[in-house]
């Protein structure tokens, strides 16, 4: 049983090490995803600005069409003036021309505003695109570094997993089942050291008879308080 307890203690050490490596890997993956999200956000902002330009271009086009239409109306009205014979009709057409010219001035002002807005946003897009190129370079370098670290961790995890498989062969199936259940229930820690009369898992005092029995290392014993499997470290390391 001493060898089985020793294997159980070693299994716990291996599993805790794998847990740590998995945690580091998860953190790196999270960092990688954050970098991807940063790039996606930058690209989305550029796309949104381009949509603004597209909308402004469409609005400018509509204004220019209206401007062309009003200019045509003025040309027709001015041509018509030559054919007018009454003062009343002349005044009416002149009023139409005056109104059209006022509208043209307003349309030209609106078109100018659209042009200025398009130029401003286009300048912002150019700056954002330059920043994006720099960001893509930085992210690529960071992603490569993260990937290298992830691969190193995966190598460590694979090595520990292989050792774990060999260690499990020494442990009875019934004990493994109890160990796995405790790992799930006790945040990954199923095996703890008993030291100076105490359980190092929950820091509760152990019954003297139980504590003394642990020295013999001839059975799988658990803490009456936290139910974790108890080992005497010096016993399983001999």
Image: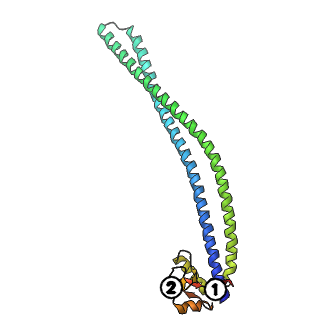
Relative to the observer, which residue lies in front, 226 or 193?
Answer: 193
Residue at position x 61%, y 45% in the image? 135
Relative to the observer, which residue lies in front, 81 or 146?
Answer: 146
Q: Nearer the viewer, mark 1 or mark 2?
A: 2
Horizontal relation, residue 11 to residue 224: left or right: right
Q: Considering only vertical position in the picture, is 20 above or below 81?
A: below
Q: Residue furthest left?
A: 88
Q: Does the residue at mark 1 contact the one at mark 2 (Cβ under 8 Å)?
A: no
Horizontal relation, residue 66 to residue 208: left or right: left
Give the percent coordinates (x, y) of residue 74: 41, 16
Q: Secondary structure at mark 1?
A: helix
Badge 2 local density, few (<14 within 10 Å), some, or many (20+)?
some
The residue beneath circle 1 is 5
State which tag comes first along the sequence, 1 or 2: 1
The disc label shown at residue 92, or none: none
Residue 98 quadrant? top left
Residue at position x 46%, y 32% in the image? 59
Q: Considering only vertical position in the picture, is 53 above or below 172?
A: above
Q: Secondary structure at mark 2?
A: loop
User: So how many labels did they put on this image?
Assistant: 2
Relative to the observer, which residue lies in front, 197 or 110?
Answer: 197
Give the percent coordinates (x, y) of residue 198: 53, 84
The residue beneath circle 2 is 205
For the C terminus, the quadrant is: bottom right
Badge 1 local density, few (<14 within 10 Å), some, or many (20+)?
many
Relative to the observer, which residue lies in front, 168 or 197?
Answer: 197
For the N terminus, the quadrant is: bottom right
Residue at position x 54%, y 36% in the image? 124
Residue at position x 52%, y 77% in the image? 186
Residue 213 quadrant? bottom right
Give the percent coordinates (x, y) of residue 207: 51, 90
- Measure the C-alpha gap from mark 1 to mark 2: 21 Å
């Amino acid at each position: 049983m001493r060898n089985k307890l020793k294997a159980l203690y070693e299994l716990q050490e291996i599993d805790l090490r794998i847990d740590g490596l998995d945690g580091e890997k998860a953190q790196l993956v999270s960092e990688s995803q954050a970098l991807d999200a940063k790039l996606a956000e930058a690209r989305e902002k550029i796309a949104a600005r381009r949509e603004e330009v597209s909308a402004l271009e469409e609005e400018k086009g509509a204004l220019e069409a209206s401007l062309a239409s009003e200019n045509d109306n003025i040309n027709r009205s001015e041509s018509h003036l030559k054919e007018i014979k009454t003062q009343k009709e002349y005044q009416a057409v002149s009023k139409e021309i005056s109104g059209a010219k006022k509208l043209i001035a307003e349309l030209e002002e609106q078109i100018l505003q659209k042009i200025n807005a398009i130029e401003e946003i286009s300048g912002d897009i150019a700056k954002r695109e330059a920043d994006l190129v720099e960001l893509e370079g930085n992210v690529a370098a960071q992603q490569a570094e993260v990937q290298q670290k992830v691969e190193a961790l995966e190598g460590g995890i694979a090595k520990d997993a292989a050792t774990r498989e060999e260690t499990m062969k020494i442990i009875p199936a019934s004990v493994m089942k109890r160990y796995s259940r405790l790992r799930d229930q006790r945040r990954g820690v199923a095996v703890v050291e008993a030291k100076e009369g105490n359980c190092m898992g929950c820091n509760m005092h152990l019954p003297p008879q139980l504590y003394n029995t642990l020295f013999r290392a001839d059975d799988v014993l658990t803490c009456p308080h936290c139910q974790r499997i108890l080992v005497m470290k010096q016993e399983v390391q001999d």
